[in-house]
Image (cartoon, rainbow, N blue to C red):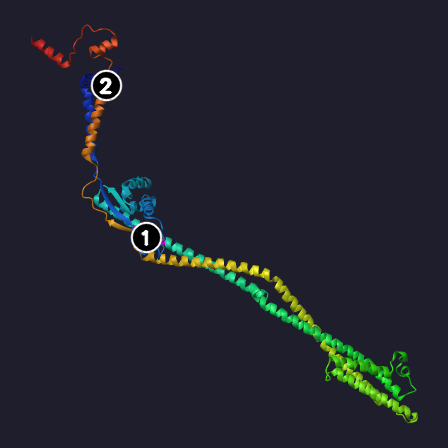
Amino acid sequence: MKELAGLTPFDYLNILWRRRWYAVIVFLLIGGGVVAVANLLPDLYISSSMISVESPSMPRDYVRPSDASSPTQQISTAIQRIKSRSFIVPLIQDFGLQGYGTSEEFLMDDAVDRVRNHIKAVSTSENTLTISYTATNPQLAQEITQRIVEMLIQFGSSNRRSLAADTYDFLEKQAQENYDALKKQEEKIKRFRSAHMGRLPEYSQQNADALKQLKKELEETENELDALQVLMKSLDIRAQERQSLGLWEQDLYIPDSTPSSISGMNSESTPTPDAELAKKEAELKELKVHYLQSHPDVIRLQNEVDALKQRLNQRAAGAASDKSTSTPFGEADIDTLDVDLAQIELEAEIYRNDIQKLEKKRESLASQIQMNEDSANMAPELEAQLSDLDREREILLKQYQISVNDRDQARLTLELEQGDTGTYSIIDEANFPEKPDSPDRVRIALMGLLAGLVMGVGASLGRELLDSTLSTEEEAAAVLKMPVLVSVHEISKREARRHAIKKNIA
């Protein structure tokens, strides 16, 4: 293999001249082939359309849109949607692209990839999007571009309406759930108030007044009980005194008889009439100090004192007369004694009934006082529980109000989306391409010729590198390391043939 290092440009020209046929052949093959291919390439037409992303017709202050993304985000989503398989497959099926329905070797995956390469979606500004489609037929290019724009607008509108409807349904369900939870909490508070009626904090003053009134009634009842018990004791004393007076009357009318012989009592235990009169006068004097003259006990005791004085006077008068003329103690006096004792027993029975009623009333009042005191003690705990229930109700009420507001906002958004034309609007309709956009045959031909020239030069130099012969004196000297004495010019076949012809002629 030859070394090309150290060669001059003239040497390279000599090499190219010697190997010129290699360069020419390669140039013609590559350049001619590229030109031929460029002429055979089909014309490609591009139809494009420009759309913009518009804001909702109603301000956001009044109606919140279902899609709150920015125009840039919506354009990015639209580009991804256009390139998706679910978007491209309907185009292939509707327009019969890539041999759909006609070719037995049709593969949907390959067709989707090829059609995706023909679709171009570019964001030209913050809120505009340019969509184009390349096809060999200008009419087909325009129709497919129009269809892509229509599908994109339809998808955007249906997607936003579906999103608005789903949002409204979700918020409606959430509002209903919050309403049910609020009603349950209110029912729980109602049951709690009903179960603790009268013991809640708002009844504290009422309970305090009732407790005060109950204590007052209890005190009055106890005072009445004490008074009735005093009367009962006085009735017992009256009964004992009446029995004693009966013995004294017998003693007055039957002087020889003794109280013990009549009643079976011991004479030492029965006071004398004079002592009894002195005792009753002392009791009467004591009662007059505390009670009025019209008091029943004062009147009763006064009558007993008068009766006792009258009997003592009668006894004194009977003692002066003959004993034979004295009136004996008869059955009428015994009946009077029984009537008095029966009356005393009747009064005692009335007092006992009154005492029993007052004792029951006292027990009832004590029970009510205990209940009120227990309620007062439970008030702080009940207040805390009720406060927790009310706090939970307030939280549920706020949640319900928020969900209702969101639901109403979603309903307005849904109504807006149903009456709106959509987020996308067409700025430029899909145009009909009057001339092909590609291929640029002149450019391809020039590039092919240039490539053929470069590759032809490369073929010439490569052939020279593979040649093992020595072409020049300098090359021979450099390779052989010896000086060149004589060089013989290369005689080509044409020169040899011409020389042979001249020789034959000569």
Q: Position of residue 236 (x, y in %)?
A: 79, 78
- Name the kind of residue labelled 1 in the image: Ser
- Relative horizontal placement of residue 194, taking residue 79 as reference (left or right): right
- Relative horizontal placement of residue 201, taking residue 294 as reference (left or right): left
Question: Could you tell me which residue is drawn at 92 percent across and 92 percent down?
Answer: 323
Q: Observer-nearest residue: 418 or 71?
A: 71
Whether pointer 2 and pointer 1 mark residues with C-beta atoms closer than 8 Å, the reply is: no
Mark 2 to mark 1 CA distance (whole Å): 68 Å
Q: Secondary structure at mark 1?
A: helix
Overall secondary structure of the magenta stretch?
helix
- Name the kind of residue labelled 2 in the image: Arg
Q: Residue furthest left?
A: 506
Judging by the rendered image, the residue that carries numbered circle 1 is: 157
Q: Residues within 10 Å of mark 2 (few under 14, many from 20)?
A: some
Q: Observer-nearest residue: 201 or 162?
A: 201
Q: Secondary structure at mark 2?
A: helix
- Relative horizontal placement of residue 78, taking residue 40 as reference (left or right): right
Bounds of the magenta span?
153-162
Q: Is residue 39 visible?
A: no
Q: Is residue 189 above or below residue 46?
A: below
Q: Quadrant of residue 201?
A: bottom right
Marks 2, 1: nearer the viewer? 1
Judging by the rendered image, the residue that carries numbered circle 2 is: 463
Q: Is residue 172 magenta?
A: no
